Image (cartoon, rainbow, N blue to C red):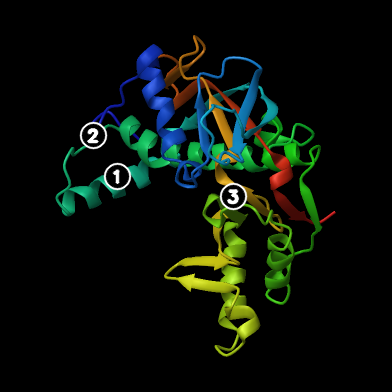
Amino acid sequence: MAITNFVAPENIVYKGKEANEILSKPIYESDLYSYGITYRPGVKGKEQLIMGEVSELFQMYTCAFSPSGEVSLAEQWIEPFTMKINLQECYDKFWPSFMAEETRRAYVGESNIPRTFFEWFFNDMLIKQMKREYEEIFWNGDTSKTGILALGDGIVKKLANTEVKKVTGAVLTVDNILDQITAVAALADINVDDAEYKIFINKGQMKILKTALGNEKIFNNYVWNNFTKEGEKVYAYGFEVVPTRIAKDVILLAPNKNLILGYDLESDQTSFQILDLSQVTGDNEFRVIAMCNMAVGLVYPELMVISKPA
């Protein structure tokens, strides 16, 4: 297959500010951002996370100034780990999809036609997969595992060694998912604002939850007094239930602001390259090379509740 007669690929090499902009795209387009999770840029090494809360501010009036109020501090640590992409692929695997997509875009009158192969591959293939893997590592990373999850410990692994409240978990089914969510919600701190918390479950098992609710009769007050649906959204005991890439059968109730994604796009290591090998080795292949870092952290784990099978 000859590709040079259509849209010839041109090498893309980004470092410094340009690489920062490229690699920030999967971070800020990730679903994690829409959940309201705290983003912490500039994490270059192991750093202490400190989050404070104040209470009991008001007192009886007196003429003199008399300080009052309580401040509580939560201290945790966050440490980045370096990640890289070393990908080498044959053009043949992707060329039919590229041609079909560019033909579709021309047919419906979209702008910027035709794109180069590398522009299409970056936006339509690479960024989508990078977003997915960011999210999977954030939730399910575990250095004792293999593959991409072994890059660093994620939220579920980090919670295992904290004061998080735990519920005995189970394989989630249509018959038990409402009871499992109820057990998690029952342990929520009674002093918290429901709007600051979310219940995170697996995307696929959100369908199980909706099926279970669909099976309930409208006059079942026990269920419908505690579970509500607003369009595609589901609320349980006042908490929004959010579909994520968290592992199957895990239910996590947490203040979204207390879950932290750290990164450092200003690092000297940050780089992004897509290279055409046909002009170098004669092979009908290309390479993607990238390097960046990521860090996962949390504060006040004692305010969180998790359910997962043993």
Q: CA distance from mark 3 to mark 2?
A: 38 Å
Q: Position of residue 53 (x, y in %)?
A: 60, 36
Amino acid type of the residue tagged 3 in the rendering: Arg
Amino acid type of the residue tagged 1 in the rendering: Met
Residue lying farthest to the front in this orientation: 63
Residue lying farthest to the right in this orientation: 310
- Sequence order check, earlier mark of 3 and 1: 1
In the picture, the quarter occupied by the C terminus is bottom right
The label on residue 245 is 3
Label 1, on which residue?
99
Name the residue rendered at 62%, 87% in the picture.
220
Label 2, on which residue?
6
- Sequence order check, earlier mark of 1 and 2: 2
- Sequence order check, earlier mark of 3 and 2: 2
The label on residue 265 is none
Q: Secondary structure at mark 1?
A: helix
Towards the viewer: 267 or 73 = 73
